[in-house]
Amino acid sequence: MTQKNIKIFSILSLSFLASLSHADNTNPQHPILADISSTSNCHFLHDINSNSGYSKHINWKRHTTHKALLKAEQFGATHLVIDNVESIGAFNGKVHGKAYKCNTLARVTSSHKN
């Protein structure tokens, strides 16, 4: 009985792993921060605005940029160009950027520049 259970478990595990390898993964990588020159062959997707909220004990710029990257990812972006960072007081601020979808070759090239 134990060998039968092991065989069933093995078959189910392999089937599950095979199904994961065929899953639709339209944007498997997170967007990267880029400068405007690396987006010349890219398609503009959306303006991205992000506010930090009150961030006394953390770096609000890093936090707000991260939130902007997450928003860009929701639009399927591969690149995010930050064009405005505005401080609002000492502990918060906002970021504006533009989300772009670039082909894989442009993504690899721009990520090696950093």
Image (tube, rainbow, N blue to C red):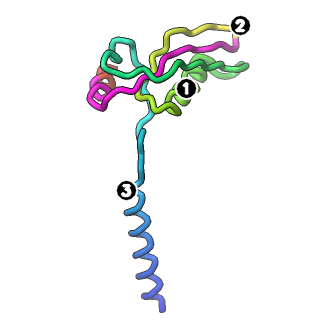
Instruction: Give neighbour class at mark 2: few <14, some 14-19, many 20+ (Cα, 10 Å).
Output: few
The image quarter containing residue 113 is top left
Q: How many marks?
A: 3
Callout 1 touching callout 2 (CB < 8 Å): no
The percent position of residue 98, horizontal first and vertical second, equals 48, 17
Q: Which residues are magenta?
A: 91-109
Amino acid type, callout 3: His
The percent position of residue 78, horizontal first and vertical second, equals 41, 29
Q: Secondary structure at mark 2?
A: loop
Q: Nearer the viewer, mark 3 or mark 2?
A: 3
**x 39%, y 27%: residue:** 101
Instruction: Give neighbour class at mark 1: few <14, some 14-19, many 20+ (Cα, 10 Å).
Output: some
Side (left or right) of 10 relative to 88: left
Nearest to N terminus: mark 3 or mark 2: 3
For the residues marked 1 and 2, what is the alpha-carbon distance in whole angstroms?
20 Å
Instruction: Give neighbour class at mark 3: few <14, some 14-19, many 20+ (Cα, 10 Å).
Output: few
Amino acid type, callout 2: Gly
Task: Quickly name the residue at label 1.
Answer: 66
Task: Quickly name the residue at label 3.
Answer: 22
The percent position of residue 86, horizontal first and vertical second, equals 61, 7
Nearest to N terminus: mark 1 or mark 3: 3
Of 22 and 94, the residue lying toward us: 22
Nearest to N terminus: mark 1 or mark 2: 1
The percent position of residue 112, horizontal first and vertical second, equals 29, 24
Task: Quickly name the residue at label 2.
Answer: 89
